[in-house]
Amino acid sequence: MKVPKSLLLQQQYLDTWENYILSKESKVYPTWDYVAITASNDFQAKGYEHQIQQRKDFLPKRTKFITVPDEGNQRVGSGGATLSVLRKIKSLEEKFSGLRILVIHSGGDSKRIPQYSALGKLFSPVPRVLPDGRSSTLFDEIIISMSSVATRIQEGMVLLSGDVLLLFNPLKIDFSLSDVGCLTFKIPPEIGKNHGVFISGKNGYVTKCLQKRSVEVLREEGAIDENGFVDIDTGAIIFSCKYMDVLYSLIDSDEKYFSIVNSKVRLSLYIEFLFPLGLDSTLELFLKEKPEGEMCNELIEVRKKIWDLIKENNFKLKQIKLSPSAMIHFGSIREIMNLMNKEMDEYRDIGWNNIINSSSDNVSSYNSVLTPGCQVGENVYVELSYVHRKAKVGKNSLLSFIEINDVVIPEEVVMHGLKQNNGKIVCRIFGINDNPKENKLFGKIINELPFGLDGNLWEAKLYPECDTMKEAVSNALNIYNLAHNNTTSIPNYLEEWKKYNKKSLSSGFNDADSYSLIEWWNRMTDLVKCGKVERLIYEKKNVENVKGLFNTTKLNPDQESWLKSKLERGDFSDKIRLLYYMGVAIGDDNLINQSFVEVKNAVVYQTLNDKKYDTSLKIKKNKHKVSLPLRVNFAGGWTDTPPYCIENGGKILNCPILLDGNRPVEVTIEKINEKKIILESKDLDEKCEYENIEDIQDVDDPFEPFSLQKAALLVCGIIPKTGGDLSEILERLGAGFVINSEIIDTPKGSGLGNTSILAAACTKAILEFFGIKYTENDLYNDVLAIEQIMSTGGGWQDQVGGVSKGINLVTSEKGLKQNIIKRKLNISEKTMEQLKQRFCLVYTGERRLQRNLLKEVVKRYIGNVSENIRALDKIKELADEMAFALESGNIELFASLLNCHLQYSKMIDSGATNGLIEKIFDIIDDMIDGKMVCGAGGGGFLQVILKKNVTKDMLHTKLRGIFPDSEIDVWECNIDF
């Protein structure tokens, strides 16, 4: 079995992070004095400086970071760039000795990976989340890994390639020479033929430096060892201070510098400064070595000078072999796609992953949002992009710095968005296998396509400048269609294409707004957190998973804009969960409360949407009285409560009950001569007189004694929600009136639906007092709206139970407006007689605590707490099962199902019972077959099914004997038929 290299490097990789932290925080730990980054021009250098500034809190404070652009903003070669670094350092320091210098050559224009041109390959993504939570880049990885190398050299310069990541054990480096060192790995010659290869002789000194030789040549030269490997030039070189001094002598005056460091001479680090170091190299071979640019007399003269200096000082090149090791090249689209989709298992042991800080859970992606519902094909890689839910992405494609909505991205293409310095947007599209250095687009010869262009893909002015990303994406897709003759739907597009100002791939290097790209990168980092919240909601994951996603208590502007946009487009379910999950994620009670406001507004709107303030109403009766029973819930409680019933429909089994033969809820309305409204409550001993309409319209305080009655007046259309004059309204109605409400001889917090049934009685009385026609469904939904207006929440089962007769199975279909259907159970007289004898209410003597219980239960439902949702679904099923048991005449089964319901109720709310309730149940356990709390529980009444031959008097005697000084007792009750 092959062991991944990453497993062998795992500990060293972890150690480099610890050394990196030491280099940041310790005042004595060896670190780089300078880190120099070469750039192609001033513009690219400024982009690098901006990105370094973005990381200032994460970089070693004792290290000076400098950027060195190519002289004259023209390509001077990697060797010329090296000399420019020496010149820059010498302008800052008296001497090289004693300095540790790291040079990262990153001045390329990224022709093979154009999406990285603007920011540079050095800052291309690396599929790793750093221990501090940041998404890594090649720059970050180099700085972290090289922090250990700084401890292995006393002085000198280490030079690296900016598109290669080296993974190795830094302890293998021991460089204290006065010459030059090269770090090499063992690789197959099939890979080595595309790179430099070293052949070493005695004591590890390099005899030959071979640049990009065929496998046959490598074999002829003896570069392939007995195991079939070659020593590859990794691009990592170590210069001694003496070698730096000698090279600097080539440019120690302005005249010398400008004559050597220019685009014509174009020196190569790996040819001009390494080839002559080979012990078997000759001047003749050196002068024939293929240059980085064009061969010219000036270059020949420079090579002769370098040769003489190297031979005079007897410099040699020491090979430093590193094993185990790995070299990852970020040099082409294909290499990146293979890494992200095929080779990731090779690097998982060092913490790499093909999904990095993205909202996706199955698409290779980096700092990207893939909205649930989008369709993405196989082997797709998405980086720093936003894919909305209606988008489709074909297989084997790459998206970079782009946002797509309801479009279809073809297979095997690269699409890259780019904002330019002029503010315009360009979307570049080309084939995944296209080489921009060649003259093909989507594998087709460019000059054979309908665009009328010649030359290579890099320079072809194909891509229209657009005002928006959406327009740019549309134009890119039309380019694809034109190139593939898919023009039936866009016959005039070629003419439209010609009207645009076009840009080439090279514009990503020359005209891009790197600052905007960095802002986009930061924006995507922030939006990924939002995208993860959205995915957790979509996948119905517990809200607890959002905790820790945001390291802040406030959304930034991009996140606020995202939330606003989602709320504007989302449906009811989307809105309530987005608000709740985001509120939990950042600990914002305002957002959490807004989730409940959204429920309230939806219910109230659906109820009142068809109702208008009726200016034609008149009082039709001098006095009207409504009396209603209370209700007992057998099964399904909580499933009638929004938002559960809105999203799933509810199901309840309940019935109305009389206490001591009475209907305890009474509401009376009576005309009075005064132009005012009087609200009275005998049981609360409260009375308020209203002469200002604003006082009646204020219903937001659920603790105000008459908020329920005032809300009923609004919902019934007697009083407008806003505006109006009370005196004028009463004049039109024909009189003032008094509403007297009372719940007779029933304790508060009983669990028997007191408040909702009082709301039903008020509503029923008002509607009938004013002669307003209504259905029972209207009444149920009116009460639902009243409770939402009062901000107390609640469902519809209480009002249904209070208005109905007999035992009913009550259901509603899902939907914002609840359509409630009742079915009165067909229970035999024998069964009904048994139930009358065996059903019993026990009062606990305790009121339920004001625990804001309803809101907590709803929170757990909105927050997808699986145990809560499972319990709700089960008690909904129990309603059917218990109805079947009663209609089958099986009281024992009914009692056992009541016990099951109690267990599920405790799963929904652990406070459904308490120590006293459990003690009561325990004491009477030998006398009962079934037990359940009434309502939400926690106090009030308990309901039990007595065993056969046990009477209510027997239960009364036992309870009074054990609890003589309390209110705990049996209450006389009867089902209201």
Image: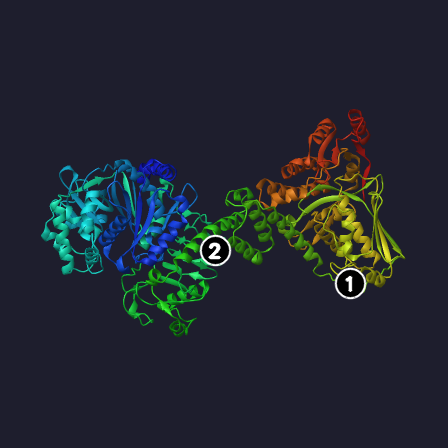
Name above or below for residue 482 compared with residue 404: below
Residue 454: give x, y in percent of width and height.
28, 69
> Along the line of sight, which residue is nearer the eye, 238 or 630?
238
Vertical comparison of 157 with 966: above or below: below
Q: Residues within 10 Å of mark 2 (few under 14, many from 20)?
A: some
* Quarter in which the N terminus is drawn: top left
Q: Are marks 1 and 2 in contact (CB under 8 Å)?
A: no
Instruction: Give SS at disc 1.
Output: loop
Residue at the far front: name it: 94
Figure quadrant of the C terminus: top right
**Mark 1 or mark 2, which has the lower sequence index?**
2
In the displayed structure, 170 sits above or below 52; it is above
Residue 948: tell me if it is visible: yes
Residue at mark 2:
374
Q: At label 1, which amino acid type do we have?
A: Asp
In the displayed structure image, the side of residue 147 where residue 822 appears, left or right: right
Type of colouring = rainbow
**Residue at left offset 85%, top offset 60%:** 619
The reply to whether residue 273 is in sight is no
Quick one: SS at disc 2?
loop
Q: Give the labeled residue for mark 1.
A: 614
**Residue 197's x, y, as percent?**
19, 47
Q: Amino acid at mark 2?
A: Cys
Residue 299 at x, y percent in the picture: 16, 57
Q: Is residue 445 left or right of residue 540?
A: left
